[in-house]
């Protein structure tokens, strides 16, 4: 049976551009519908016994096989392969306090020191910064922060972003795919697997969340948010992750949770009900539903998380739900986001300004920031004589 399902996936990959144009997508936004879909017990009567839960997830993700050549839990239809990959990831994500301290040290070393004047092209920097950290964690034997390596990591981050966008619209650029292969061979010489199997899910989950969390705290935040993040950066243990300053405010845990609510890394989760019919769980809409979150739903208010929010009832699903919930959900991702944001805040003066070639890349005075992949690309931070 699995060979038959694998053949189905491969045929979809081969015919992907045409397949994408012909697929129909039904979007659901209510909490009961989304929970039912992600629990793999959908109420849609079109679901047939042939479409297993793994296949239902793999078919919409088949574009990632064509773009990146990956073979991981997101694309496989094999339960043993899914289980082995998940077990491997869970082991990588189990970090002790010393490991978190090491991450804090490395993150600080990658951010330019806060000096009297300077500038920072934010999006290209964050792509390279986050990807470097992920490589450091998942492939320590290949990690070497030298000039050539840093340049290759920057190229890899840009190529991942470009190919991801291309994969949504048809066949990716052969030239970009060759550049991707060449870049991987420079960064991971002699490796016997595709490192993107591990890197892609972690990198894609993190860098855009780090960007928006930084923007919220740096340009629209309260001083106590910044202070509590600095304390966590100095000592990234359990206590400082959940602590609130004596004068009030929000914990690092709450700041990260609010970022994940307003700016979920996966805005829509797709499942196939037939090879050409998909259902999309709109996580972004769910997280911005005023009936679940209140009238201030469009505003970044991390203090709301200290009011006893029930995540199950509120529909908080930044890392999915059900059997395929991301193993980084509870500890790894939130804590890593806190460290990465704090390290960038440490390197950028509190009074830094910004310029942007595109008006849409500017920082709004209030309300929700944009959450599209290509936003803030022209945003440059400036301070001191660079202003």
Image (cartoon, rainbow, N blue to C red):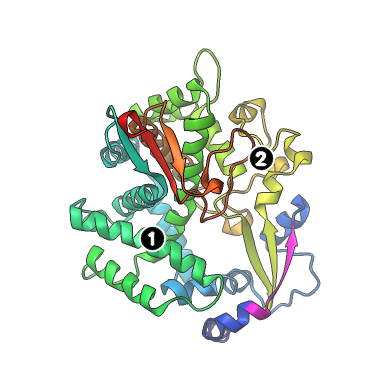
Q: Which residue is mark 2?
A: 311
Which tag is nearer the camera, tag 2 or tag 1?
1
Residue at 52%, 55% in the rendered image: 373
Callout 1 secondary element: helix
| Alpha carbon separation for disc pair 2 and 1 | 34 Å
Q: Nearer the viewer, residue 247 or 334?
A: 247
Residue at 79%, 65% in the rendered image: 43
The percent position of residue 5, horizontal first and vertical second, equals 58, 82
Dividing the picture into quarters, in which one does residue 249 lie? top right
Q: Is residue 22 above or below residue 37?
A: below
Callout 2 secondary element: helix
Q: Quadrant of the N terminus?
A: bottom right
Residue at 54%, 46% in the rendered image: 359
Q: Is residue 215 above or below residue 179?
A: above
The percent position of residue 317, horizontal first and vertical second, equals 63, 48
Dividing the picture into quarters, in which one does residue 340 lie? top left
Circle on res. 347 = none
Please identify the residue farthest to the top as the structure is shown: 247
Residue at 53%, 13% in the rendered image: 247
Q: Which residues are magenta?
A: 21-28
Q: Residues within 10 Å of mark 2 (few under 14, many from 20)?
A: few
Q: Quadrant of the C terminus?
A: top left
The percent position of residue 332, horizontal first and vertical second, equals 44, 44
Q: Nearer the viewer, residue 252 or 347?
A: 347
Residue 338 showing in the rendered view: no
Circle on res. 158 = 1
The percent position of residue 91, horizontal first and vertical second, equals 39, 53
Q: Residues within 10 Å of mark 1 (few under 14, many from 20)?
A: some
Q: Nearer the viewer, residue 351 or 241?
A: 351
């Amino acid at each position: 049976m699995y060979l038959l399902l694998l053949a189905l996936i491969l045929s979809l990959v081969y015919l992907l551009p045409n397949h994408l144009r012909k697929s129909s997508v039904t979007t659901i936004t209510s909490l009961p519908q989304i929970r039912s879909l992600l629990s793999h017990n959908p109420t849609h009567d079109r679901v047939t016994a042939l479409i297993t839960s793994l296949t239902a997830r793999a078919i919409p993700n088949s574009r990632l096989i064509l773009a990146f050549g990956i073979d991981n839990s997101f694309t496989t239809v094999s339960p043993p392969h899914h289980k082995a990959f998940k077990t491997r990831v869970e082991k990588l994500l189990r970090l002790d306090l010393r490991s978190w301290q090491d991450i804090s040290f490395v993150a600080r070393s990658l951010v330019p020191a806060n000096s009297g004047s300077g500038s920072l092209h934010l999006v290209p920097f964050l792509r390279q910064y986050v990807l470097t950290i992920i490589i450091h964690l998942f492939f320590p034997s290949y990690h070497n922060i030298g000039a050539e390596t840093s340049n290759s990591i920057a190229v890899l981050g840009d190529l991942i972003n470009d190919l991801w966008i291309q994969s949504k619209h048809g066949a990716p650029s052969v030239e970009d795919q060759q550049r991707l292969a060449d870049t991987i061979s420079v960064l991971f010489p002699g490796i016997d697997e595709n490192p993107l199997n591990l890197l892609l899910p972690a990198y894609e989950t993190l860098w855009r969340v780090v960007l928006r969390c930084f923007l919220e705290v740096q340009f629209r935040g309260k001083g106590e948010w910044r202070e509590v993040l600095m304390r966590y950066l100095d000592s990234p243990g359990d206590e400082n992750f959940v602590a609130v300053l004596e004068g009030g405010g929000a914990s690092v845990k709450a700041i990260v949770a609010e970022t994940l609510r307003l700016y979920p890394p996966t805005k829509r989760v797709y499942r196939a009900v037939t090879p050409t019919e998909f259902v999309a769980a709109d996580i972004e809409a769910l997280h911005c539903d005023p009936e679940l979150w209140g009238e201030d739903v469009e505003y970044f208010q991390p203090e709301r998380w200290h009011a006893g929010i029930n995540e199950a009832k509120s529909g908080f699903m930044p890392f999915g739900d059900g059997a395929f919930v991301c193993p980084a959900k509870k500890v790894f991702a939130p804590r890593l986001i806190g460290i990465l944001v704090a390290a960038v805040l440490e390197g950028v003066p509190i009074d830094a300004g910004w310029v942007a070639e595109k008006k849409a890349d500017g920082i709004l005075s209030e309300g929700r920031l944009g959450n599209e992949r290509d936003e803030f690309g022209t945003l440059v931070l400036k301070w001191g004589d660079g202003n």
